[in-house]
Image (cartoon, grey):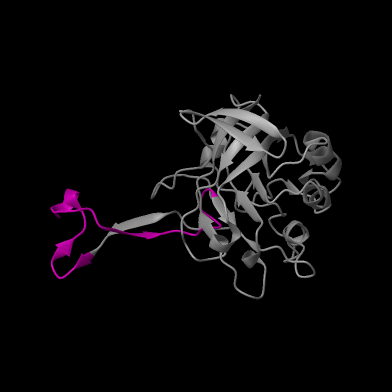
Amino acid sequence: MKAIIEHEDKKYSVDLSRPIDISYPLVPGAAVPKCFWAPNVEAEPVRAHGFVGSTAEGGVVNFYDVKLNPHGNGTHTECVGHIAKIQHSVQESFDQFHFIAKLVTITPRTIDNGDHVIQEDQIIAVLGDELYDAIIIRTLPNDIDIKKVDYSESNPPYLESGCMSHVIGKGIRHLLIDLPSVDRESDDGALAAHHAYWQYPENSHDKKTITELVYIDNVHQDGLYLLEMQVAPLVLDASPSRPVIYPLHIM
């Protein structure tokens, strides 16, 4: 299935029969990426009044309770409600689900304290002069083993908060990254990059999202994509999500 996308003053062609899923599946009990000391995803059959929700145990249907932490288990999308004093739902952040996105690859730099960070000049260099609805950041090294990483207490790479002024200036409303957080794992609660991106509380944005722990295979080249945001309709500050991208070709 092929389509023509008109956006601003440009036309793009896209093949909708060739989706690229950049989310991690949430597999109960499996070694999926997780962070911030979250437990593994759990799924247990309901047991009540002689009923068991497992066909493997003799039940007539599979009927499971599921336990997960949206921020700690796999790919998730969050809104300003993650840091705001007033409750916001990620569901309120979307009035459409398709966006023009740029996929970029960046190698975090090592700074004096040993942290690995993405800095503003790197963001400026990869974004160039064009405007986009969304940015998808793939970091190097991008080894297949990251699919099984528990990032807890590993001080993974993050974005310096200064990056966000350029992201905001580009009009980006949806930021996706393959790291567990845009901020340092332990920063005494500052969450500087989150605050800078959402401009909270001075000029808070409730239509902008951050999606963390995506995975983009190295076979997919940097460039323009049609981004489709699929977010579970969970009314919280964050929800499991399944971003899907399609290569765009300028006509």
Residue 139 in sight: no
Instruction: Describe residue 51's horizontal placement relative to residue 75 as left or right.
Output: left
Depth order, front residue of 76/174:
174
Residue 230 is a magenta residue: no
Instruction: Describe residue 91's horizontal placement relative to residue 197 as left or right.
Output: left
Quadrant where the N terminus sits is top left
Report the residue at 45% width, 58% height from top.
68
Q: Quadrant of residue 80?
A: bottom right
**Location of residue 202 in the rendering, given as x and y in whole percent from the top left corner:** 80, 69
Instruction: Describe residue 15's horizontal placement relative to residue 158 as left or right.
Output: left
Instruction: Answer above or below: position of 38 versus 202.
Output: above
Depth order, front residue of 144/102:
102
Instruction: Answer above or below: position of 148 versus 91.
Output: above
**Location of residue 52 in the rendering, given as x and y in whole percent from the top left corner:** 18, 60
Q: Quadrant of residue 66?
A: bottom left
**Location of residue 141 in the rendering, given as x and y in whole percent from the top left corner:** 67, 32
Report the residue at 49% width, 59% height from top.
69
What range of the chain is rendered magenta? 47-75
Report the residue at 54% width, 38% height from top.
22
Report the residue at 56% width, 29% height from top.
14
Quadrant where the C terminus sits is top right
Residue 50 is a magenta residue: yes
Depth order, front residue of 138/165:
165
Residue 182 in sight: yes
**Location of residue 129 in the rendering, given as x and y in whole percent from the top left corner:** 83, 36
> Which SS does the magenta portion mostly show?
loop
Depth order, front residue of 165/30:
165
